Amino acid sequence: MTTRVDPGFMKKVKGLGDQNMEMCFNCSKCTAICPMDTNLLPRSLFRYALLGMTDKIKAEQESIYSCLLCKLCEESCPRGVKIADNVRLLRSYLNRDVFNI
Amino acid sequence: MAEQKLTGIYFCDTGNGHAKDIDINEIKTYLQTLREVVSVWEPKELDLTNFEETKKKLENLKIERMIIAGQTPGVFKAFFARALNANGKNGEEVVLASFKEHLVVNTQQAKTILTCAFYGVSFTLAAMPEETEVHPDTLVIGGGIAGIQASLEIADAGQKVYLLEKTGTIGGHMAMFDKTFPTLDCAACILTPKMVEVGQHANIEMLTYSEVKSVSGGPGNYKVKVLKKARRVNVNTCIGCGTCAEKCPGRASSEFDAGTTMRKAIYIPFAQAVPNKYLIDEDACLYVKKGKCSACVKVCPVPDCINLDEKDAEIEITVGNIIVSTGFKPFDAKRAEQFGYGRFPNVVTSLELERLINAGGPTSGEITFRSKDKFGNWVFTADSESPKSVAIVHCVGSRDEHYNKYCSTVCCMYSLKLAHLVKEKLPETEVHEYYIDMRAFGKGYEEFYNRIKDEGINVVRGSTVKVEEEDGKLLVKSQDIHGLKLLKQHVDMVVLAVGLEPREETKDLSQILGVSTTEDGWFKELSSVTDPVNTNVGGVAVAGVCHGPKDIPDTVAQASAAASRVIQSIIQGKIKKSVKDMRFEEVAAKAKQQS
Amino acid sequence: MAQIKEVTKILVDNLKLRGSVLPISQEAATKWAKDLNLPKGGDTILYTGNMYQIIPYINKLVKTLELFEGTFFMNFTVFGRMANRFVNVSKFMGGPNKEEVKTFNNTLTNMAKLLQKSGSKFGYLYEDDLYAGALTYDLGADDVTLAQAKKVYENLKKHGVKRVITVDPHTTHMLREVYPKILPEFDIVVKSYIEVLAKRGLNPLNNKGGEVAIHDSCVYARHENVVGEPRELLSKAGVNVKEPFESKKITFCCGGPAESLFPSKALEVGKKRMAQLCKECDHVTVMCPICNANLKRSATNGTKITDFADYISEFYLEN
Ligand SMILES: Cc1cc2nc3c(=O)[nH]c(=O)nc-3n(C[C@H](O)[C@H](O)[C@H](O)COP(=O)(O)OP(=O)(O)OC[C@H]3O[C@@H](n4cnc5c(N)ncnc54)[C@H](O)[C@@H]3O)c2cc1C
Ligand code: SF4
Ligand code: SF4
Ligand code: SF4
Ligand code: SF4
Ligand code: SF4
């Protein structure tokens, strides 16, 4: 299986608003505490985004939209990642670049 | 003196980065007296978002060299290098004058750093303080493995050492462990002989149960006032028989056992303590508190050995050098509420587990559940049951913006060690270990990690977020990052790999000695690259964890290095004065001379 | 997963074309204020943002979606989205539960009365009390949200408003945190009615007390730091406040925000939360219409759920 990456992806997302995904050091406390119990939300989404895996981002729409923006994860995040804001920005990206809304 | 190039200077953070005591205007006025400095800018005067404009400004002034000054000058280096290049100058001519690196806190120091940058001279070279005579005796503060090692090195070189220790015994944290990573050597087998040697060495005078009250004088000749707290037991005559403790009604939690068991008010910290003598904890002694007991005096076989009315004493010593080796304190696990320490009895700290595993500990080496004794204290006893499953949680209190941002460096490795020891003691018990990154950085450490993984220990990449209680078991919540699986693991015992923190007294001690500390509160070395043991105060060196988290091998290496600096100065009979006391004019003159 | 795109589009189009994610009639939106004689506009106003008024309609939509989720009929939304441009599709979803509408209107009335009791003087914008755009913002539809924010701000300015008292956490968050970020000129002071009541030191008429489990809204607790105020008002009235397993700063979400796209997931989370709350008390108080709706959907064993304003009215208002 080949995975295509878009090196300019984060640039696009940054253009949509403030984000700090790169602060994430991949500990997954957030995923472990998230009430939605999906394996992807939110840590994996940030990995995809940081790597520019646009196909994955598109394929995982459901996870991106199922986030409650409840910030429970942020209380546990050791790196001060603004998780809810970051997830919302991925939605902005989808709306703009994928759904053309 | 070398010819100077036309220079521009940029202050990168006059807005908020500086200490209040730095007067930018005074510095500017001074810099303009240097002939080749053609312009000095503050951020508001130079728009770095506009490359073209800045480049033009440099071009018009024919600037050939830029100095960037402030807390984080490195950030702007690339920008100015590009501008110089674009003007056909040499982009290499960007010099950083970092206030942060040199602990600049006032105008004079800022001027000094800038002057060195201007003359292209390294600060550490220009700021070479003058030398003075040195008293041959040395004070070592803190009797952990660092202090023990340093003392022995100096004493073996034939010089007198005072080893000052706050508690009733030397040994520090290492004395609490059963085995040490990565070799799994028996900790006591290494440490105890050294402790005994210290106790018997003709050149070492131990000052246990003592604290530094004040320090006066200067490098080479420090007068140190030492508070000798009342032991209430005569160290010279006590035979360590323990008869007193048997009868003593006073009780307190045992510090040496990390609170896993109780001890008496009259106690010996542990069986191999040096000095191997008893002492009385005044906070727990009924005589001291209420004037109502003297059971120990009645049973002690040595006449006048116990003096319940002994008072604290003060002595003064004179030394030429001081080595600070006060170690650390473990992170207080109660602060990370999500793990339930203090709420769930079988959430334990790594240090507590060390004591359980140690044959000399409260359970004689059995790993058991915490239970209440007949007085209602939570303790560990050998007759309690053993866990069938154990989870070890990494990074508790470390690498976390809520607590300490730094990595405590030793907990990954000691967690692996503990996992191994649990498995060795209880082969049927499941052991799960949850980590963020496995920091197996030292010699033989990666090999140790691989060995542990082969021992049937479930090592999971993914941090634990929370410990809850469910159906009488502890529930550990994590995600397995590699397997992409949410984990809700039920276990009997959770071990928190607590990080290392500066001790509370570090602040006082840094004030008494004048030694700078880092933002995190560790003692600061003069230069992490070229001088990792001396400090900004002449004749004061650091060794061990009080300088930053490190393991025993690194601690011992640094202690030996500190000792060699001391020995060097004694052999030469001379010692450098403090860098922090150097005057601006002095350094500036030297810098000019050296350029 | 076509529904994400389609539902988002319906909501976005609605906001764009009809000024609200789910358009309701003016009469329905302002009915709660009928007997209160509130002046129109003024320095300080009570701003509902229509959340309490819309929720019953959303519930209806959710019920419809739930029926279709994961089935062939989900494609209905695709059709719905195309039709929505021309006719207001939500109209065809059938009317909301009458009882629910009445309760929520009554809650708003109670809030206004409580504020009056505390000595606060305020007006209301009636038909100009617009939806603040919380849902479209959360869905990441930034352009429409910004356009809506501008509209809301112009409206407030037009009526000379300087201070706004909000009634639900989502509108509070939009006006207080989001608007100033996306609309730098936004200069209205925003406080929730709970904060105003606590600040003004409103005293109860009786402290007959009671027992209630408190469910913190994530938005109040974590985004807006409204944690102490409701507890203060409750304990003043002698109420024994029961804290569920996760509360205050680490409150567990009601699941509501997932409602419009993933109703069954929302229900799952809601059930988890209800289980925590039920353990403490069979009466739960909530501070947000979304929490209210989603927890009610998730409640099984007759646990009573009461909006905070209604609950404290028992102690602070004469009936
Ligand atoms: C649970 C755990 C397990 C570990 N396991 C290992 C291992 O297996 N292998 C390994 O290499 N490392 C291990 N370490 C790290 C090891 O503990 C340290 O590297 C080592 O103890 C550092 O020694 P030290 O002398 O610098 O400090 P310490 O051991 O802390 O000793 C400092 C001494 O100074 C005294 N003191 C403090 N303040 C004052 C004062 N103001 N005045 C006078 N005296 C004072 C203290 O009482 C103490 O005796 C472990 C650490 C922990 C927490
Ligand atoms: S908790 Fe924070 S740092 Fe850890 S994976 Fe999640 S976002 Fe990244
Ligand atoms: S904000 Fe989103 S990712 Fe974070 S805990 Fe809530 S639902 Fe999960
Ligand atoms: S009984 Fe006396 S000699 Fe024996 S340990 Fe106690 S104090 Fe020392
Ligand atoms: S006098 Fe103090 S130390 Fe001695 S037996 Fe009594 S309580 Fe213990
Ligand atoms: S050494 Fe390991 S466990 Fe300790 S703080 Fe660093 S990464 Fe975490």
Image (tube, grey):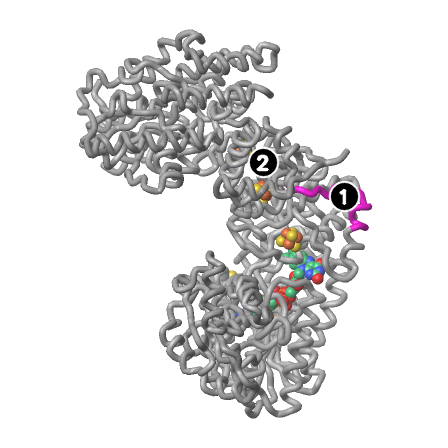
Q: Residue at x 57, y 38 (%)?
A: A30
User: Nearest the camera: B289 or B55?
Assistant: B55
Q: Quadrant of the N terminus of chain C?
A: top right
Q: Which chain does tag 2 point to?
A: A
Which residue type carries mark 1? Ile
In the image, residue B170 lies at what x, y percent?
63, 70
Q: Which mark is residue B457?
A: 1
SS class, disc 2:
loop
Q: Amino acid at mark 2?
A: Pro
Instruction: Give the residues in magenta.
Output: B450-464
Q: Is residue B107 left or right of residue B499?
A: left
- Residue C96 sits in which quadrant? top left
User: Residue B202 location, x and y as percent?
Assistant: 68, 84
- All told, the count of numbered labels is 2
Between residue B232 and residue C285, name the one nearer to us: C285
Residue C181 screen position, x and y as percent:
39, 41
**Which chain is home to disc 1?**
B
Q: Residues within 10 Å of mark 2 (few under 14, many from 20)?
A: many
- Label 2 CB less than 8 angstroms from ligand 3: yes
Residue B295 at least partly seen: no
Q: Is residue B463 magenta?
A: yes
The residue that label 2 is drawn on is A42
